[in-house]
Image (cartoon, rainbow, N blue to C red):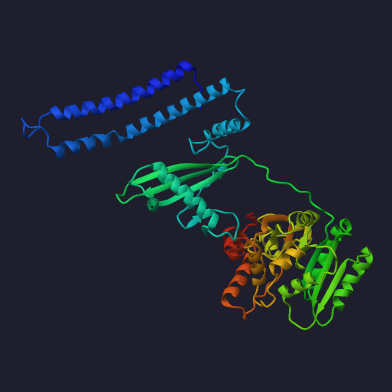
Amino acid sequence: MFRCSRRQTLMLASVIFLLFLICIFKLSFTLESLAIKPSSSHSQDFLSHSDCQSKINTIINKHAHEIIMLQDQIRELQLALLNKKLRHHISANSSRIGESCLKQIRFTDKLMKTDAIEGQSYISERHVPIFTRFDMWHQYQVSSTQNMDVRDKLNGLQRMCIDEVIDEAVTFINSTKWRRDHFTEGIYHTMPTLGTHYELNFLNDSNHRERVTLFRPEMPVIPLKSHPVDFSEKLNIVMPLSGRIDTFVLFLTHFEEILIKMKNRIFLTIVYFGKSMQDLLNVFQPFIAKHRFRSHHIQLVTDRNFSRAYALDLGIKSWKGKQDPIVFLCDVDIIFSQEFVDRCMTYPQKKSRVYYPIVFSLYNPKVLEAYFNQKLTKLSDKLKVSSDYGLWRSFGFGMACIYRSDYLNIGGFDTGIKEWGEEDVLLYKKFAQSKITVIRAPDPNIFHLWHHKHCDQSLSDQHYKSCIKSKTYNEGSHMQLGYLVLKEDINQDRPYKRRLH
């Protein structure tokens, strides 16, 4: 950033004027010499019009790089002059400048230091921003998430944003030879607190190319609303269950800590499928007696096969209390902490918001033990939010925190669905397509335990493929699975013990 005195500012303006004069003088002198120089073959004749035009184009092309450099220098001097005038205006009128104007000035000062204006020096190569590439229909982005698509179709809001940027670029070029359909591709990256830097490429019918740099500034922070969170609400945990008693015992071990803190505000509803629930009672009754836990209800289902949608719907509708509780749709292989419970009771808002946490799904412990070359006997050894231990289950919509009344008003689960996983997605779609806001975010305090997944051969091709896809994602990371596949080759190349992580 230039900082000039008033005298230096006048000198900068003079330099700009002189640069223009030099360019004009060079071109005029060259053209004049062409006009008076006799032809080698016809000493008395002037150059023909076509020969003259050809030589003019040659000279312009020869000096094109120099012209571009001069234009860039002129722009830099103009920016410096503009910045000097702006700062002079601030110092002369500081008492009359409002807070909003000062914010705009500070933003301009930051923008001048970004890579949208000039090259940047970064502390480390890891700080260099990675741009997202896009065209009219798709965007291509790099992500460390294993299940992230390498090419995404632009959704409604993304498409609207890109359309606006393209239209602004065409207007900025300000020439009849450029149209919207000349846009070929672009890149962008977002700078926190500043905005988004765009680079758009155009190619017209005459095979001319143009690159346009744009910047969409981020608006200042605007407080919208606040409301107190009522922690006196009841939380009804609804859990479908069929067998898996050992996993239920593990669930109770972690549930115990939360129950001690929230004894009067938490309710557990279990919908159990089987001929008898004696196996369940054998492990649950000692827990009930130990904590004098009366806020529970067990619904036995004997007349049908296991159906998660049917179980959750039945559990939600079986509520007999007068309050309208927050319902947590939960599975037996889910482990969560008090911090998650706080979010489950904070984010939902009646007739307004629901919370769909993105659960951290743990990898197959046998794969982890083979990779780390050590036993992971304690569950606490595995409950780590790390790419070595699991991944964000962004493709899963089974866990949710919803007011009971909102669930009923939206129409609830389609209990006739028997296909794998579809009931969760359809309920999620109902909320997404309604006026209720869906809060969807990774939650580091809720874990999905690995368990063997059976993909039924009777599933449709689409749902069988989805089941297999989910199963492979949950086995291990690319590095860990690759290590197991190449283990023999690695041992041959490295006969001594060496860990690769």
- Residue 316 quadrant: bottom right
Instruction: Say left or right for 407 vs 35.
Output: right
Query: What is the quadrant of residue 491 in the picture?
Result: bottom right
Q: Residue furthest top?
A: 7
Q: Residue at x 5, y 30 (%)?
A: 44
Say above or below: 408 vs 57.
Answer: below
Total numbered badges shown on the rendered structure: 0
Q: Position of residue 335 (x, y in %)?
A: 77, 62
Q: Which is nearer the eye, 299 or 160? A: 160
Q: Nearer the viewer, residue 210 or 426?
A: 426
* Near-viewer residue (267 or 332): 267
111 on left or right of 311: left
Residue shown at the point (43%, 45%) measured from the top left:
169
Residue 150 visible to an observer of this rendering = yes
Counting from the top left corner in percent of width and height, residue 260 is at 89, 58
**Residue 114, percent from left and from top:** 53, 36
Q: Quadrant of residue 171?
A: top left
Residue 469 percent location from the top left of the image: 60, 68
In-front residue for pair 494/369: 369
Q: Is residue 24 above or below residue 449?
A: above
Image quadrant holding the C terminus, namely bottom right
Relative horizontal placement of residue 385, taking residue 144 as reference (left or right)? right
Q: Can residue 448 be seen?
A: no
